[in-house]
Image (spheres, rainbow, N blue to C red):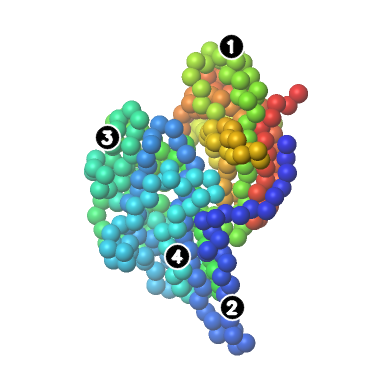
Amino acid sequence: MKQMKTLVAASLIGLLSACGGGDDNNSVSTGTFNLGVSDAPVEEASEVVLFFSHVVMVPEDGGDAIVFDFAEDEGAPRSVDLLDFQGSNADFIISERELPVGDYRMCMYALNGDGSEELSYVNSKEQGIVPLSIDSQGSCYGTKPDFEDGGRLKLTDERLVSINVGINSFVAEFDLRKGLVDPKNAPGMKIKPNAVRLVNVSEIGTISGTLAQTQFDACEADFSSLLGASEFSHAAYLYAGSRDRTTMGDIAGDQGFPADSALVEPVAVASINPVEVTQEDGTTATELQYEFGFIGEGTYSIGYTCVANADLPDTHETDAEGFAIYQHYTPVEVEANEETVQDLDPIL
């Protein structure tokens, strides 16, 4: 089943309902800036908490950098449990701040953990509370905040952040399945610098849907037989463009795919979770639901699998290592400010 319906993201209504403008002489030279944080979930942790210390915006025209210092502005670093804000939900850590109009490069800085819950940490299902850190220690295009023991996440590279007159809302979308790693030779866990992308709220839509129970059961039965799987994790993999499962790859990380491979990495991964819903007659039922939030306009494809647990973030896994895409759905069209509904039903 595939349909389109109007997107209403409750977390954004307040930020987008205002309107900006200038006077007849076009004298207005500032815009309102909002920055949110969201995440695609992981299963090996119940909490992934980052303590954000600064956001730095460097004007492309060479002007003075603008530094948001949470300790100075709010009295403490801004802590966010990324797992609390998934799909189209976001925690806006900067709201309604006036900035000069223009193009900027942007970075976020977070304090590295020390093993306590007072700094960045992961509550791992296997290890309990462990420190969380970001390896990159560099400046933001020549500007670095004055603080100790923290990491940098670059949110822009080739594409700049444009602040226009009116409301300008962006979301830093984390993908922890790709970027949260447990290094073998170091304590704690790390977030890779490429684990986050910046999206303009005015240019995005969402994709959501349900997984049919018959598809759920068939995948587990088939992959138990074909791959020898005994543990299962159901997920939807999102790929750019229209493609089938023969080119739908896993999260290959730094290892990448073989030189002659036609496989591509997913642009996002969403867990499929049971959700209690109220039906028209007032009774409740359980649906298996997924959602991709903050997806740019364009054509996509979805791959469904029940062995996402076999997909490791830094290496390429094939069916020999227990990973495969079970079914594909294409094309899936995304339009700005719209929700695309793509149910994961059996394809006969």
Q: Calculate the distance from the C-alpha at mark 3 to the C-alpha at mark 4.
A: 35 Å
> Which residue bears the numbered disc 1?
225
Q: Residue 161 vs residue 210: left or right?
A: left
Label 4 crowd (10 A; few <14 / some 14-19 / many >=20): some
> Which residue bears the numbered disc 4?
95
Which kind of residue does numbered mark 1 sit on?
Answer: Ser
Tell me what residue is drawn at x 55 percent, y 55 percent.
Answer: 10
Q: Calculate the distance from the C-alpha at mark 1 to the C-alpha at mark 2.
A: 62 Å
Placement of 276 over or under 337, stated as above or below: above
**SS class, disc 2:** loop
Q: Are marks 1 and 2 in contact (CB under 8 Å)?
A: no
Tell me what residue is drawn at x 45 percent, y 65 percent.
Answer: 95
State whether residue 160 appears in this view.
no
- Of 235 and 179, nearer the camera is 235
Placement of 77 over or under 346, stated as above or below: below
Mark 4 vs mark 1: in front: 4
Q: Earlier in the sequence, mark 2 or mark 3?
A: 2
Q: Calculate the distance from the C-alpha at mark 4 to the C-alpha at mark 1.
A: 52 Å
Tell me what residue is drawn at x 61 percent, y 24 percent.
Answer: 216
> Which residue bears the numbered disc 3?
187
Residue 32 point in image, percent of width and height? 50, 70
Q: Earlier in the sequence, mark 1 or mark 2?
A: 2
Which kind of residue does numbered mark 4 sit on?
Answer: Ser
**SS class, disc 4:** strand
> Which residue bears the numbered disc 2?
21
Which kind of residue does numbered mark 2 sit on?
Answer: Gly
Mark 3 vs mark 4: in front: 4
**SS class, disc 3:** loop
Q: Earlier in the sequence, mark 1 or mark 3?
A: 3
Q: Residue 32 vs residue 223: left or right?
A: left
Residue 252 point in image, percent of width and height? 51, 32
